[in-house]
Amino acid sequence: MLNVRRLVLDLLKPHDPDVVTFAESVAGCEGVAGVNVVLMETDKEVQNVKMTIEGDSVPVDTVHDAVEDLGGTVHSIDEVVCGEVIVEESKTPQD
Amino acid sequence: MLSRLKRLLRALERDDVRSISRRYFISNGFDGALTSVGVAVGSYLSGVPDGLVVFKIGTGAAIGLGTSGVWSVWEIERAEKRAELKRIERAMLTDLDETQIERQKAGARQVNALMSGIGPVIGVVLPMLPFLLEGTLLGLRDATLVSIGVAVSILFVFGAYLADISEQNWIVAGARMGLAGIVVALLNLVLPG
């Protein structure tokens, strides 16, 4: 099985713990080299965030567990990059 | 045991936990200090023969108030924090049992209850200590006066502390809280019984 190099998640989380705690917690997982969390939308009780995780071998299940332990839920996996090199999304005429 | 202690210390790092704990601690400590003034003056006026008896009565009051502080806050915070969790669960459309949020709230509840219980114990036991010196260094009347003095001092410290965190004049705030102890002592003197 090839290593996951990049994972982009659409998350729903409570206001507390804050995004810093989420980023720190996921960044602490083995195989994760860096994390970026962007606040997409904020509501009265919850926040919708986009989390980008990169590393040599991103442990998808461990990341899921870390997010769920903090009270977050993964709405969708919006992007996955696997393999030897990181391949960016390519533009097509339809774009 | 160590992990529980760590959880309590982690909970204490949170501003919201410190703020609620502080309220319970001061509020119940205030109750305890005023109760001790009532016990001291009431015991002296009703002719309790020695200081050890007054100390034992005070200890009984401290146990009662301390237990009340822990028990009531435990139940209050269980309900409040459960309600908060349910509200978040409804918004998240998910179960938050056994998540860090639930563990944090449990830790916060324990700290709140602990501080709520410590407040009245300090508020009662310290003012009762002069009665242990009755018969050796102090007479019963002197022990009663020193006890009131200790209780008023505790109330003053509570007031000064509250003034410190809210950037008020600590002397005025301390005096305002300390005055309550003197008022209770005077009420015990003038009211029948």
Image (tube, rainbow, N blue to C red):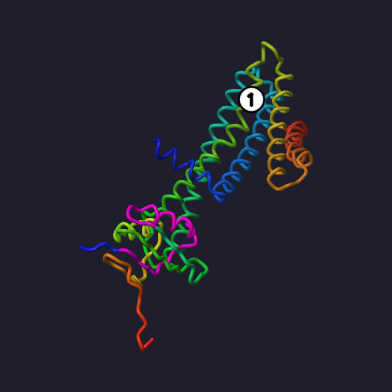
Q: Nearer the viewer, residue B62 or B19?
A: B19
Q: Amino acid at mark 1?
A: Met
Residue beneath the point at 20% across and 63% down? A1
- Segment colored magenta: A5-33
Location of residue A77 in the rendering, given as x and y in whole percent from the top left corner:
34, 70
Indicate the quadrant containing the C terminus of chain B: top left, top right, bottom left or bottom right.
Answer: top right
Q: Residue at x 53, y 32 (%)?
A: B63
Q: Chain of mark 1?
A: B
Of A90 and B74, the residue lying toward us: A90
List the single residue furthest toward the bottom: A93
Residue extending farthest to the front is A85
Question: What percent of the width, then of the height, locates residue A25?
Answer: 41, 54
Q: Is residue A86 above or below residue B171?
A: below
Q: Position of residue B59 (x, y in %)?
A: 57, 27
> Quadrant of residue B22 in the image?
top right
Residue position marked by numbered label 1 in the rendering: B128
Q: Was residue A17 drawn as part of the magenta stretch in this picture?
A: yes
In x, y percent, where is residue B146?
72, 23
Residue B11 falls left or right of residue B120: left
Quadrant that contains the N terminus of chain B: top left
Quarter of image, res B5:
top left
